[in-house]
Image (cartoon, coloured by chain):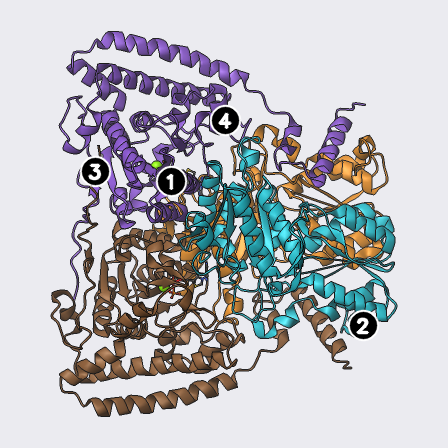
Chain colours: A cyan, B orange, C purple, D brown
Amino acid sequence: MTAETLTLGRAVGRALSDALETDPAVVLIGEDIGRLGGVFRVTDGLQARFGADRVIDSPLAESGIIGAAVGMAYRGARPVVEIQFDGFVLPALDQLIAQVARIRFRTRGRVRMPLTIRLPYGGGIGSVEHHGESPEAYFAHTPGLRVVTAADPQEAYSTLRAAIASDDPVLFLEPKARYWTKGEVDVAIARDLESARLLTRGRDVTLAVYGPLVQTALEAATAALDEGIEIEVVDLRSISPLDVDAVVASVERTGRLVVAHEAPAEASVASELITSVVERAFAALEAPPERVTGYDTPYPPSAIESHYLPGLDRILDAVDRTLGRRSSHELLEGSAP
Amino acid sequence: MTAETLTLGRAVGRALSDALETDPAVVLIGEDIGRLGGVFRVTDGLQARFGADRVIDSPLAESGIIGAAVGMAYRGARPVVEIQFDGFVLPALDQLIAQVARIRFRTRGRVRMPLTIRLPYGGGIGSVEHHGESPEAYFAHTPGLRVVTAADPQEAYSTLRAAIASDDPVLFLEPKARYWTKGEVDVAIARDLESARLLTRGRDVTLAVYGPLVQTALEAATAALDEGIEIEVVDLRSISPLDVDAVVASVERTGRLVVAHEAPAEASVASELITSVVERAFAALEAPPERVTGYDTPYPPSAIESHYLPGLDRILDAVDRTLGRRSSHELLEGSAP
Amino acid sequence: MSISLPVPRSELIEGLDAPLGVLDPEGSRRASPLLDESIGDVDESVLTDLYVDMSVVRRVDEEAFALTRQGALVLWPPLRGQEAAQVGALRALRDEDFVFPSYREHALAVLRGADLADVLAVWKGAALSGWDPFAQRLAPSQIIIGAQTLHATGYAMAARRDGGDDIALACFGDGATSEGDVNEAMVFAASFRAPVVFLCQNNQYAISEPVGVQSRTPLALRATGFGIPALRVDGNDVLAVLAAVRIAAERARTGGGPTFVEAVTYRMGPHTTTDDPGRYRDDAEVAAWRAKDPIDRLERHLARIGAPVDRIREEAAIRCDAIAAQVRAAADRIAAPAPESMFDHVYVEPTRRLERQRAQHRAFTASVEGLR
Amino acid sequence: MSISLPVPRSELIEGLDAPLGVLDPEGSRRASPLLDESIGDVDESVLTDLYVDMSVVRRVDEEAFALTRQGALVLWPPLRGQEAAQVGALRALRDEDFVFPSYREHALAVLRGADLADVLAVWKGAALSGWDPFAQRLAPSQIIIGAQTLHATGYAMAARRDGGDDIALACFGDGATSEGDVNEAMVFAASFRAPVVFLCQNNQYAISEPVGVQSRTPLALRATGFGIPALRVDGNDVLAVLAAVRIAAERARTGGGPTFVEAVTYRMGPHTTTDDPGRYRDDAEVAAWRAKDPIDRLERHLARIGAPVDRIREEAAIRCDAIAAQVRAAADRIAAPAPESMFDHVYVEPTRRLERQRAQHRAFTASVEGLR
Ligand SMILES: Cc1ncc(C[n+]2csc(CCOP(=O)(O)OP(=O)(O)O)c2C)c(N)n1
Ligand SMILES: Cc1ncc(C[n+]2csc(CCOP(=O)(O)OP(=O)(O)O)c2C)c(N)n1
Ligand SMILES: [Mg+2]
Ligand SMILES: [Mg+2]
């Protein structure tokens, strides 16, 4: 049980391999996950080791993949599905929303849907259209699904194991830009699917993030310290349900909140978290919460994605605003906003 | 140009018929819209009048309907699509999100997508599964789509005409529980696709609603008056983008905000509106905003839908809370919330 | 510069020109080289059972329809006319085979012994699904057109992987064949040689749209394009359906993979109790199909083979009256669920968010009721 | 109790046993009763043009591939091996016909005269689409597998409604045939007899998955299940593809409805520049297909018919070198768009919400740059 150093991608692979080994009901299905080992090589070697009937190269049809996984679950399997890229989950939304998320409710608990859907997401990899998106809000708005992500290899390992072990359907969002991030992984460490974690302590501002932006948030916290600003970084980990208690507790200490994610702002996870915190900690807030998100446009060409994605400076700019410090908004022309 | 009394459903039919008459590029396509006139009879008589190549009964495939409409638009048509019920828009989400909403952006304005998608939505009609849902948040989170709705026959007529005339893709949500509501319709009245309207004036609380809940909100305002509480009812009309300016202006007068809709709360339009208002009118808020929405569960069996849907009493309960009056929360056991 | 467009043909299909059948509308037995082999065991007693099954199923349908008109149920999609297709298919299966129905296959639930209150609860708006899917080996009736065909296929893939010899039956209509999901189901089934039977009840209409809107060629042909063999049978001939689904099930069970069975039939009633079929089809068409009634046909056949038809009819009537009473009693018995049950079973472990909403709902209800 | 599973056949299909062709790998001309009729006009000059087209397209592909390896582009899906399929198809169309490509059909853009910078911009991450779709009558390349087939079908439906005699061409791969959208496109096309040609380039792989994962039977058979006639041709034989698409286009133009053309070919390179085909296919397979190279084959044919091959080769080389230089220059020329352009064209009229975000972005950028 000693820790091993793995990239985040390899940690995911390790979790899959350990799950396949531990539980004969676990089956992997997806496009190119077999012989190729997936386009990110996350499932590398698993088909050779566990056989083509447990690591299944599927036809090119995402609704088909999810729908077939539902049927497998009816017969006792515990399917772990890979959808190749964020943008390609869209053809499967009907099966995910109207079936996977609801079958348990529809049958008053008689039919379990222990599916795990792995979805590489997020931008910053300099690719082409549909390869940099963050569709989590669609799932957060869907009751019956759990939506989780991970920021480092240990988290990826433990979260994915918990997702596979859960009898709820879990969408596991893999921050693809962090696949090559290295870290220690101890396979004995377990985690739940609902709690956030506090990464830094500080009295000034709460900064709530998840997945690919956790690293950025930690860098922001370090940079802010130079100016004497203490940031509490909360890694939300669970996107739905959100651990509002943890964020409220932090905001009660800091009085200020910044929420950052890559997805667009409108009707987003940031909207949800801010609203939830306002509902429960209104009195504690000393300044309006800020969100730092992708803009409300389609994901732009990758040549300019760095301008779309929240980076260190945009986060610090928002932090400054919550503290009443000089921020870019002073440069705003006219009345907006 | 004198006004005529029509039900909301007939007003929609009238808008379609006027659009077909005015613009030869307008084409209707959907399931059962021809001979049958649609399951709500909204398109009754249109196929007989305009021909089967302008009022098209489509095969039973929602992705196909939207995708085909995209192709028609490429060739200059202005398709008006009917999706039969809220729940059945899900198979079309990929074409709506990855194609319809983005083609203009993708082509830097070269390809217009003047589609109108008509979607009966909302609950309270006592039907079976998938016939009472409110999926608007999925679309509000999707840049490039306009999402609008209507609360009465005049609004339905004018909004649908504006939607069909717009070169943006517009999702027009039809409050099916209000199809039989009657009202005056003056076909000369035009409206835009982005502004809310203030229905009542009052100094105490802003109540923002849309579609099926507008009527309920007006009733709530009347009931509140009996207790001396003045509610400003804002009919949002445009769900995306939201007319935040109008709501902020109202909240600056009232200091309090309640947002109600039938869709679940999490990552919803209510989350968005509250967050937007908090960002811009934090100082004006005298109490935490309240949302009154469907719960974060799948839509329940219709026998108990009245408990799921926001009604008059739940709205007034929230209004009371914003005013620091006695509300049901005093009956909460233990610490929650 | 053109290629001719011949009448579509495929060697993967049987019954393309005219649906295969073994009973004609007058009830005489015709030979069918393909079908006969698999119904060699069908004697008078089996025929009687099928007759009673169909009669009972029709009566359940009639009662539920009437209850809906009376307001005791909120909606009902009647199966009248499709008794042979549904009874024949179900009786071709083993108990352990798993069935994935759409919303119109009430016969399957009745014959699999579901509690009638469970069958009706959905249509009273009291539940989103009825029976226990594992007790009845019958998935909840599916309203999203076609979605269940993928579930059946996945089930069959898992059965094959586990080396089981159970199979899956996917039920859907003519309209459903246009949905992407149904086509993807055929892709997966063919690719993985899944032991699934695709039963398409072509009742000629998808609500108001005649089947010609979905396809200009027989639906059974569709499957052959996926490399899936197809049988097109007279769906009002219970023996033909029984035979075809037996053949298909046996192929599936013995590693032969999927088969598509198109049962050509007719929806005698409206799409649902809120539909008005007078808007889209004429009486002559309905009358022509009435003459092909599946129950009358089997009754004539029983008479032809010298079975004691009066006694059988009487037996059926007793069973029908009994179940009719049960249906009415069941409809009465169904209570609306507790409002608070809407917070149950969303997740395995209730989330804090939902528990909070449950508490708020409870407090609100208490406040409205003026309690406490 | 079983039905036999014969080799699938259908009268709707030509070329099922062996893809139709008119040029064998050695370049000799074979007779094809079906195809010959539609390429009677093909003389040495046409052949030369096709040779030059294919050579030019290959060179563009090679240059772009090399540029990607050098980091000048972010990604490139090479078409090498598929020149005949793409050139043959495009040259069978009229200029007014509208083409809906996937991401690998660079040949179509090049032959339709798109600015090379527009062709490359997408692959430099500088744009989400290149050329003007209406100037080139070519939709943006589509990355969501299969989505464009519905667009092509809808386009064709509108063309038919307007009484136009223009048609649509839908391009997609073998993998795409599994997507619901592609099947729904066939449903709509057949139902509305839409003037659309479905061109499936079966290059044997969907990334790493051999076509057998999608289908156990030839893909052209799929279409016949929808009642759509299919032609299965040697996709490395430019004349066969030209003939097949001409036949299909003519059928479409004259009211005959859709046709499916399967061009059986091979992707000689990796799926994209980030792929590693060594993981899923062996050298022998690649070598076998190299022997069927479409350009070599046409060159041999030109030699056989006594055409001045050296001169033609030289002409092609000059054109290739010229375009290679243009490709490199074009790649250099593509600038990243202004960051603020991300706020443009989301809606026809900018919304207040987006204008606010644009202002915030501008202010933020100014603050970071320390300007003002
Ligand atoms: C995805 C989806 N789209 C539309 C509907 C609405 N709808 C309910 S039944 C029906 C027609 C189904 O026809 P068919 O498949 O032939 O089955 P039948 O009703 O004839 O048994 C339609 C369009 C639906 N339930 N699901
Ligand atoms: C909906 C969707 N799912 C998955 C992908 C990822 N993907 C890109 S290309 C490809 C394979 C496509 O194969 P095929 O249709 O044969 O075309 P080819 O690449 O061989 O030209 C896949 C799976 C995608 N782009 N879109
Ligand atoms: Mg039908
Ligand atoms: Mg391919």
Disc 3 from disc 2: Cα separation: 79 Å
Residue D70 rendering spot, x and y as whole percentages: 50, 82
At horizontal 59% and vertical 23% (from top left) the residue drawn is C336
Nearer-the-camera pick, D117 or A244: A244
Q: Are marks 3 and 2 on the same chain?
A: no
Q: Is residue D357 left or right of residue C114?
A: right
- The amino acid at mark 3 is Ile
The 10 Å Cα crowd at callout 3, few under 14, some 14 to 19, many 20 or more, is some
At horizontal 49% and vertical 50% (from top left) the residue drawn is A92
User: Which labelled disc corresponds to residue A209?
Assistant: none
- The amino acid at mark 2 is Glu
Q: Which residue is mark 2?
A: A330
Q: Chain of mark 3?
A: D
Q: Chain of mark 2?
A: A
Q: Are marks 1 and 3 on the same chain?
A: no
Q: Quadrant of ligand 4?
A: bottom left
Nearer-the-camera pick, A324 or C185: C185
Nearer-the-camera pick, A214 or B52: A214
